């Protein structure tokens, strides 16, 4: 497992005690911690450059605009997008997916099919339910296989599901509850063969592994900055330029118009057309710095590190009596989700907190999947660059203490 010299020193928040114990932060799937470089970039922006973008002709506004557009270019490089104009700044994954889903809501009709999967986060599920309701289109799901969803998506059924009626296929790259890594390039290729537009939810993958939108061949891809060392309140919708050119604006107002009369308005091209109002300038700049930080660590090394920790955690947790581990038994993304028959996930998380360990317990915004698996909640440990094998030992010891208390 690769480790980086003194990486934990880059994250000020990690150096604290929680309930008298050193903090073991294993809730990275919910949000990651921020390195000093990102925090400093935010402070620098507000202390030196803060101004509105694209509007002012004074020095500060020009500096802010350069930094904001520089961040867009940086993120295009990070994703290997063909053009910075394919990067739209949003509030996060949820807003990004909603923009695409709302556009489909106005274009689809009865007889059209929206295809998604049974493992989607609510953010890549409810917007499509809404689009189906508004348009009369039918929503279908690719099934998840196995009692613990260990079999991943039912790819064998995809040929039947991917008919020419499918206009859009939306799927997650890595499941936030199962850790399943979906074969996104293959899914895009198969969708393309029937003319379906692809939308990838990359919330749990983009900060954890190299990601190349052109190699994957997706049409849209959504992610949040806060899960990849960046600030909260900033995210990205990547869209292929040819598609963005045809897409109507989602929100209207200042900044996205060319000419306005009392009768109507004309729109700027992408990306401005999709960024009405004053954007999150500091957030975008911070996200650009987060990209620098992750690239300096080497994203392939991050992927090896996070996956190795998840495998180790899976192995060690599997020795606990009665534990039910969800998701793939082999290669998985950097998280492990589990349930005990006699202890509620909220109790597990509360006990772990007493040991300084931050976990997540609940349905993880995957209610339909939970129901399918016969669960109401799981406990989830999710890993990132600063986590260590020793922290997994602390996690497992905490789980043993919890089990001893509740089960004996
Ligand atoms: N998951 C978790 O699992 P936002 O809130 O817009 O930044 O991200 C939403 C989202 C979309 N897709 C996936 C796969 C996700 O994991 C998430 C966020 C968090 O703990 C919060 S529910």
Image (spheres, rainbow, N blue to C red):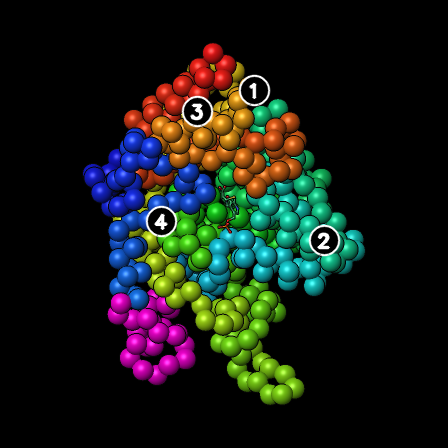
Residue plotted at (45% across, 41% down): 29
Nearer the N terminus, badge 1 or badge 3? 3
Residue at disc 3, secondary structure: helix
Residue 314, disc: 3
Residue 229, disc: 4
Q: CA distance from mark 4 to mark 2?
A: 34 Å
Nearer the N terminus, badge 4 or badge 2? 2
Name the one closer to the observer, 108 or 39.
Answer: 39
Q: CA distance from mark 4 to mark 1?
A: 35 Å
Nearer the N terminus, badge 4 or badge 1? 4
Residue plotted at (60% across, 88% down): 261
The answer to whether residue 336 of the structure is visible from this angle is no
Nearer the N terminus, badge 4 or badge 3? 4
> Crowding at label 4, few (<14), some or many (≥20) Cα neighbours within 10 Å?
many
In magenta, the rendered stretch is: 47-72
Q: Nearer the viewer, mark 4 or mark 1?
A: 1
Q: CA distance from mark 2 to mark 1?
A: 37 Å
Q: CA distance from mark 4 to mark 3?
A: 24 Å
Residue 132, disc: 2
Residue plotted at (37% across, 68% down): 69
Name the one closer to the observer, 164 or 305.
Answer: 305
Mark 1 and mark 3 in contact? Answer it, CB < 8 Å: no
Residue 366, disc: none
Residue at the top extreme? 408
């Amino acid at each position: 497992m690769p480790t980086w010299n003194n990486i934990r020193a880059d994250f000020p928040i990690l150096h604290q005690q929680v309930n008298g114990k050193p903090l073991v932060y294993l809730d990275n799937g919910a949000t990651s911690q921020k390195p000093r470089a990102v925090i400093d970039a935010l402070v620098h922006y507000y202390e030196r450059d803060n101004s509105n973008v694209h509007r002012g002709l004074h020095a500060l506004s020009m500096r802010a605009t350069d930094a904001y557009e520089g961040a867009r270019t940086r993120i295009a490089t990070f994703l290997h997008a063909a053009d910075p104009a394919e990067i739209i700044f949003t509030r996060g994954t949820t807003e990004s997916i909603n923009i695409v889903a709302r556009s489909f809501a106005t274009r689809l009709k009865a007889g059209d099919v929206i295809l998604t999967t049974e493992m989607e986060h609510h953010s890549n599920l409810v917007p499509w339910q809404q689009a189906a309701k508004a348009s009369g289109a039918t929503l279908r799901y690719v099934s998840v296989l196995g009692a613990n969803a260990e079999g991943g998506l039912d790819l064998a059924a995809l040929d039947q599901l991917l008919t020419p009626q499918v206009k859009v296929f939306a799927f997650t790259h890595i499941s936030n509850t199962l850790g399943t890594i979906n074969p996104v390039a293959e899914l895009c290729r198969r969708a393309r063969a029937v003319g379906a537009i692809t939308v990838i939810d990359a919330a749990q993958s983009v900060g954890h592994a190299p990601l190349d939108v052109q190699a994957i061949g997706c049409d849209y891809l959504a992610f949040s900055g806060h899960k990849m060392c960046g600030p909260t309140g900033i995210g990205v919708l990547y869209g292929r330029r040819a598609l963005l050119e045809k897409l109507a604006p989602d929100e209207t107002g200042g900044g996205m118009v060319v000419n306005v009369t009392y009768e109507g308005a004309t729109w700027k091209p992408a990306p401005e057309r999709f960024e009405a109002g004053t954007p999150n300038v500091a957030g975008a700049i911070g996200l650009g710095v987060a990209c620098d930080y992750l690239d300096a660590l080497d994203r392939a090394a991050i992927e090896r590190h996070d996956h190795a920790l998840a495998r180790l955690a899976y192995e060690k947790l599997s020795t606990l009596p009665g534990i039910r581990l969800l998701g793939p038994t082999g290669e998985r993304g950097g998280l492990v989700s589990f349930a005990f028959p006699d202890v509620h996930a909220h109790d597990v998380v509360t006990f772990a907190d007493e040991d300084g360990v931050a976990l997540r317990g609940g349905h993880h915004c995957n209610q339909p999947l939970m129901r399918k698996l016969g669960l109401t909640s799981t406990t989830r440990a999710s890993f990132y660059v600063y986590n260590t094998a020793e922290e997994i030992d602390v996690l497992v010891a905490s789980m043993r203490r919890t089990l001893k208390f509740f089960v004996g």
